[in-house]
Amino acid sequence: MGLILFLLFGVQGGSDLDFQTYKSKVEPLLLEKRPGHARCVTCHSTGTAFRLQPLPKGQTAWSDEQSQKNFEMVKKFVRPGNPKESRLLVMPLAHEAGGTEFHPGGKHWESQNDPEWKALADWVNGTR
């Protein structure tokens, strides 16, 4: 039941997550264009509970202030020390690889060995 509630509502935690690592390794993944998919920011800057700051037109990165706001939002969808229970990692992960059954933006990673998934998992685990 705990995992079901977590998947529905996220977690309010994340105090052990490092901002600098987030900014250098996680945030660029939210802007990454993947073949056949929109960038995370495209959908997650409007209309979802996981709400990133809109990316200013013509810019390729967020300001420090916007990054801090994004960090605060992302922390709500992460369970520090447990990537497999972090919505940020399980929503876009293939169901067969341990992800949720559905993600409106499609599945970005086929396995937990994907370099992007591993980078996020390292951050969630506190590895810099």
Image: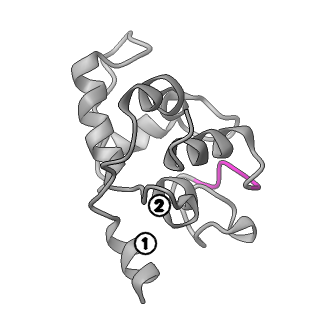
Q: Residue at coordinates 42% horizontally, 35% vertically from top-left?
A: 41
Q: Position of residue 72 (x, y in %)?
A: 26, 42
In the visual, does 97 lie left or right of 26? right
How far apart marks 1 and 2 lie (CA) works out to 6 Å
In the visual, does 108 lie left or right of 43? right
In the visual, does 116 lie left or right of 9? right
* Residue 123 versus residue 19 in the image, above or below: below
Q: Residue at coordinates 28% horizontally, 32% vertically from top-left?
A: 53
Which residue has dot 1 on it? 7
- Tell me which label, 1 or 2, sits earlier in the chain: 1
The magenta region covers 106-111
Q: Nearer the viewer, residue 118 or 4?
A: 118
Which residue has dot 2 on it? 87
Q: Position of residue 39 (x, y in %)?
A: 52, 35
For the residues labelled 1 and 2, say whether their Cβ atoms are less than 8 Å apart: yes
* Residue 65 versus residue 104 in the image, above or below: above
